[in-house]
Amino acid sequence: MALLNEVIAPFAGLAEDELSVSLPLWRTRKIKKGEFYNRQNVVCKDLGIVLKGIFRIYFYDPKADQEKNVYFFSEKQFLVSFRSFIYQYPCSYYIEALEDSEIMYMDYHDLQKMYTASKSWERFGRLLAEHFFNHSQGRAEDLLFLTHEKRYLNLLEEHPNIVKRVQGYHIASYLGVKNQSLSRIRKRLIEK
């Protein structure tokens, strides 16, 4: 209940009694480093909240035999492949734990029941959609309009400890640069 009060209540303005109705529908799951929350070509069936750990969402391009990191999610953030979850069709990405992690999650069908049962939970669903739309559009705009250095600074702002928690090649992939370029970015920022 404490996490729901900390994450969902301020996000959607749900009162404690509205949150408590959902308590039986939330479950927890531990995911070891290197294991998956969801896989490419599998339907994402759960909406998660990260309790502990960090995850990466990445696309695997079999033609290039290359992984491309798209997002990172860490503590107190929602964890989901949103399009796959909403439309219940296969996911385009993998969601992998980069550390031993723990999540709290609700099944798609249970969340749909909450939407039907309560205007407040229906509002939560709308806000969640807006949140992920903003994330998605922001990521696209970052890739189009920002320098690699500015994208790196934005990543540090969103995930302050990411450099200590995630290997550099994952961060480089997220930024769309090679490891050597990431090293140069870090060096320039230190010199400033």
Image (spheres, grey):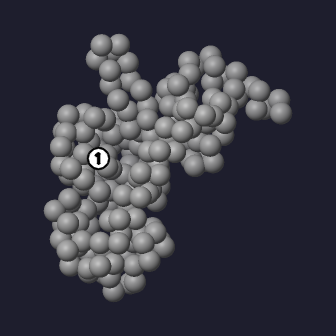
Relative to residue 35, is residue 189 drawn left or right?
Answer: right
Q: Is residue 119 above or below residue 190?
A: below
Give residue 116's quadrant in the image: bottom left
Residue 33's spot in the image, x, y percent?
Answer: 37, 39
Q: In the image, what residue occupies the spot 28% across and 35% down?
A: 92
Give residue 117's quadrant in the image: bottom left
Residue reaching furthest to the bottom: 17
Q: In the image, what residue occupies the spot 32% across and 21% down?
A: 61
Q: Is residue 14 above or below residue 71?
A: below
- Report which residue position mark 1 lands on: 83
| Residue 82 appears anywhere in the view | yes
Relative to residue 40, is residue 186 drawn left or right?
Answer: right
Give whichever of 11, 127 is nearer the camera.
127
Q: Is residue 111 above or below residue 78?
A: below
Give amino acid for label 1.
Arg
Residue 56's spot in the image, x, y percent?
Answer: 41, 39
Q: In the image, what residue occupies the spot 35% across and 65% down?
A: 126
Residue 134's spot in the image, x, y percent?
Answer: 47, 52
Give whichever of 153, 26 is nearer the camera.
153
Q: Quadrant of the N terminus?
A: bottom left
Give whichever of 5, 63 is nearer the camera.
63
Label 1 sits on a secondary structure element that is helix
Relative to residue 133, is residue 82 drawn left or right?
Answer: left
Q: In the image, what residue occupies the spot 24% across and 53% down?
A: 86
Q: Is residue 100 above or below residue 191?
A: below
| Residue 23 appears anywhere in the view | no
